Amino acid sequence: MAQVGLLVAVLGTGCSLIPGSGGETFPGSGSETCVDWVRFATPQDQYDHAGMVLIGKSLSQAGETSIYGYRATTHLVEVERVLKGNHGSGNLSISSMPQTCTGGESYPDGDPLDTDQRVIIFANQQGGEWFTMTPAQGVLPFQQGTALPFR
């Protein structure tokens, strides 16, 4: 698996969402799992560190799972072409990696797999489930006739 160096979990950061507080976080009032995400310089770096890379399209939401204490939306993805890795055949369930340290909101900027467009998905397996590599760099738009941004 190509998961080495992808993320670092930081526990007990001293920020948490207080239930019923109106959404504010209060430093020192608890803890929440925060992840320091790796920023890949190029799509080639993303490709090199992914366990699986594919071209596909989200067909529908297929439930939820949990990672780092956050809800992650799972999508049923129609796999058009596997570029790296192996998932077998047919459609694949992939969860969008949620952002952390957001007071419990998984996708403050929107779920990157919640699209009806063709995309390139960079994924890794965590606990037997497939997740996009990071919240910000797990999905790239991809149009027919466009050259791949990696080799």
Image (cartoon, rainbow, N blue to C red):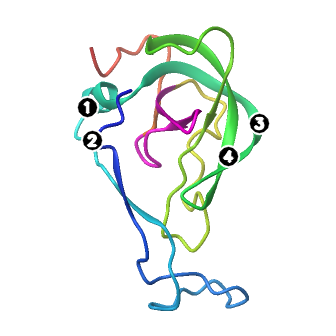
Outermost residue toward the left? 41
The disc, 3 or 4, on the residue closer to the chain's N-terminal end is 3
Contact (Cβ within 8 Å) of mark 1 with mark 4: no
Q: Residues within 10 Å of mark 2 (few under 14, many from 20)?
A: some
Give me the residue at 41% from left, 25% from top. 51
Q: Is residue 53 left or right of residue 115?
A: left
**Would you place residue 11 above or below residue 106 in this image?**
below
Q: Main secondary structure of the magenta part?
A: strand
Circle 2: element type: loop
Quadrant of the image containing the C terminus? top left
Distance CA(mark 1)–CA(mark 4): 25 Å
Instruction: Looking at the image, tell me whether mark 2 or mark 4 is earlier in sequence order.
Output: 2
Q: Is residue 26 above or below residue 125?
A: below
Label 1 – label 2 distance at C-alpha? 6 Å
Task: Reply yes or no: does residue 134 show up in magenta.
Answer: yes
Quarter of image, res 53 = top left
Residue 85 sits inside the magenta stretch: no
Query: What amino acid type should be assigned to the residue bearing mark 3?
Result: Ala
Query: What's the distance in space between the residues labelled 2 and 3, CA to CA?
Result: 28 Å
Which residue is under mark 1? 45
Residue located beneath label 2 in the image:
40
Q: Which residues are magenta?
A: 120-137
* Distance from the alpha carbon under mark 3 to that under mark 1: 29 Å
Give the Cα separation between the discs numbered 3 and 4.
8 Å
Mark 3 neighbour class, 10 Å CA radius: few under 14, some 14 to 19, many 20 or more? some
Circle 1 SS class? helix
Cα–Cα span, label 2 and label 4: 23 Å
- Amino acid, disc 2: Phe
Is the Cβ of the residue at disc 1 closer than 8 Å to that at disc 2? Answer: yes
Q: Is residue 52 above or below residue 135?
A: above
Q: Quadrant of residue 96?
A: top right
Q: Is residue 76 left or right of residue 4?
A: right
